[in-house]
Image (cartoon, rainbow, N blue to C red):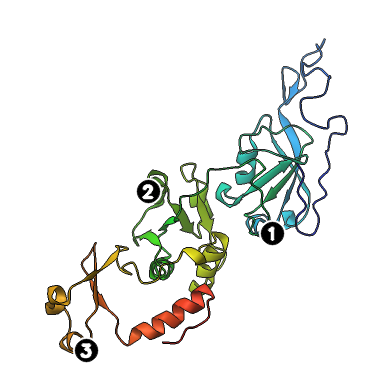
Amino acid sequence: MKVDHYEHDKLKSRRNSKAVRGTSNVSCVPAKQSTPPAPGTHSGWPSVTTVQFRFYAELNDFLAPWQRSRVFSQTCSRDASVKHMIEALGVPHTEVELILVDGLSVDFSHRLADGEFVSVYPAFNTIDVSPLVRLRPPHTRPARFIADAHLGQLARNLRMLGFDVLYRNDYSDAEVARIAAGEHRVVLTRDRDLLIRKEIVHGCYLHSVGCEEQLAEVLTRLELARSAQAFSRCLNCNGLLQVVPKRDVEHRVPLHSRMVYDRFYECQGCLQVYWEGSHVTRMRQRVEKMLGTPGTDG
């Protein structure tokens, strides 16, 4: 199956003698040689192959400048997997949604052959690629996250919207990878070397530096806006909030607040008490801005 996308995507087979791989009647067994194999070969087979690559959209950010937004040739070891070569070029596997080889969709295990043309695409928001080869199982719903040590504010913003986000400022890369694999979490990071770890199945590299822009990236890429449940989690520890009787927590609330407010919430994790003070109106306006939803009266 072929896909048209971006400024051009007229994918043509680089092997005119084959419409589909494996249909040629040419023997794959090398001819018997009367002389020793040439240097750089093994038993008559070349030790390297040359493949053409084309990366699209934001995947170009990971490439060397001369490789961006153009077709380029790349040598690789014989029988190298397409996943190995994509990551060798600097693109984490978590950022790739679709791979076409000579116009046919393949998975990460595809072994590259000399002369193949490889097109590599990021996540699609408007094109349904489900009929094509899936590179990974879908992430869990609702999405669960783990943010690396440099994304504390993003973690708080996502928690404000009700998303399950693990975060500590002392996480090592190995810990992030282990937790993500064990708990089926999406890794949020600006460290592409972290996303190359084979244990990580789902990840989201953040191209933006600013907190608001990073949040918009995550919400858009993973289509999260409709599943937000604002003010349902603790900003500090990620625990769920539950309504509690005022009498059970009023001794832990400032005098003015317990005289004015009657509705209180307690974190099931760290036992932090929350109430709808004057700041909640500002927080709701902020949430509406984050989600792109219109304001409401009251």
* Camera-nearest residue between 137 and 83: 137
Tell me how far mark 1 sits from mark 2, CA to CA. Answer: 30 Å
Mark 2 or mark 3, earlier in chain: 2
Mark 1 or mark 2, earlier in chain: 1
Q: Quadrant of the C terminus?
A: bottom left
Type of the residue with mark 1:
Ala
- The x, y position of residue 149, in whole percent, is 39, 61
**Residue occupied by mark 2:** 179
Above or below — where is 192 with respect to 289? above
- The x, y position of residue 66, in whole percent, is 74, 56
Are there few (<14), some (14-19), or many (20+) residues within 10 Å of tag 3? Answer: few
Element at label 3: helix
* Camera-nearest residue between 248 and 83: 248
Tell me which residue sits at (45%, 82%) in the image.
285
Type of the residue with mark 2:
Ile
Label 2 vs label 3, nearer the camera: 3
Q: Classify residue 265 as left or right of residue 231.
A: left
Q: How many marks?
A: 3
Label 3 vs label 1, nearer the camera: 3
- The x, y position of residue 94, in whole percent, is 55, 49
Are there few (<14), some (14-19), or many (20+) residues within 10 Å of tag 1? Answer: some
**Residue occupied by mark 3:** 260
- The x, y position of residue 63, in whole percent, is 66, 54
> Which mark is on residue 3?
none
